[in-house]
Amino acid sequence: MYQLPETGYLRLRQIIGDPKAQPPIPAVIPVSKSTWWEGVRTGRYPQSVKTLGRRITAWRVEDIRKLIESQGAA
């Protein structure tokens, strides 16, 4: 299983996975991209932080860990 770093940021493909990457990136939260963004919009998933650049969207590892724990998938 993919190990989350202790601190830092995750890009979307590190969260929902990317089977086309070399090597493939396993999903931490196995949902589609549209499902993820709908969840962000409705508050089901954490809001992104945009401090990494104009075109770089990322989430705090701590927020993703809380999400996983709240879903009982830890």
Image (cartoon, rainbow, N blue to C red):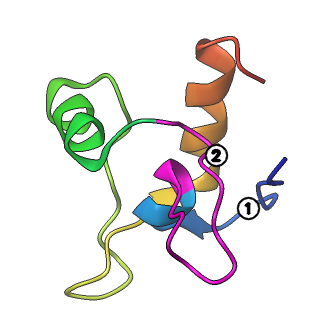
The quarter of the rendered structure image containing the C terminus is top right
Taking depth in this image into account, of 36 and 18 the one nearest to the observer is 18
Q: Which is the main secondary structure of the residues drawn in magenta? A: loop
Residue drawn at x 54%, y 63% as measured from the top left:
19
Q: What segment carries the magenta color?
A: 15-30
Residue at 46% x, 64% y is: 13
Looking at the rendered structure, the secondary structure element under dot 1 is loop
Q: Position of residue 17 (x, y in %)?
A: 53, 56
> Residue placed at 60% from the left, 14% from the top?
70
Instruction: Tell me if label 2 and label 1 are in contact, CB under 8 Å.
Output: yes
At horizontal 33% and vertical 55% (from top left) the residue drawn is: 48
Q: Earlier in the sequence, mark 2 or mark 1?
A: 1
Q: Nearer the viewer, residue 34 or 60?
A: 34
The part of the image, by quadrant, that contains residue 41 is top left
As shown in the figure, which amino acid type bears the numbered disc 2? Glu
Q: Which residue position is annotated with label 2?
A: 62
Q: Secondary structure at mark 2?
A: helix
Is 25 situated above or below 43?
A: below
Residue 69 drawn at (x, y percent): 69, 21
| Numbered label attached to residue 7 | 1
**Front-lying residue, 21 or 67:** 21
Label 2, label 1: how far apart the Cα atoms are? 7 Å
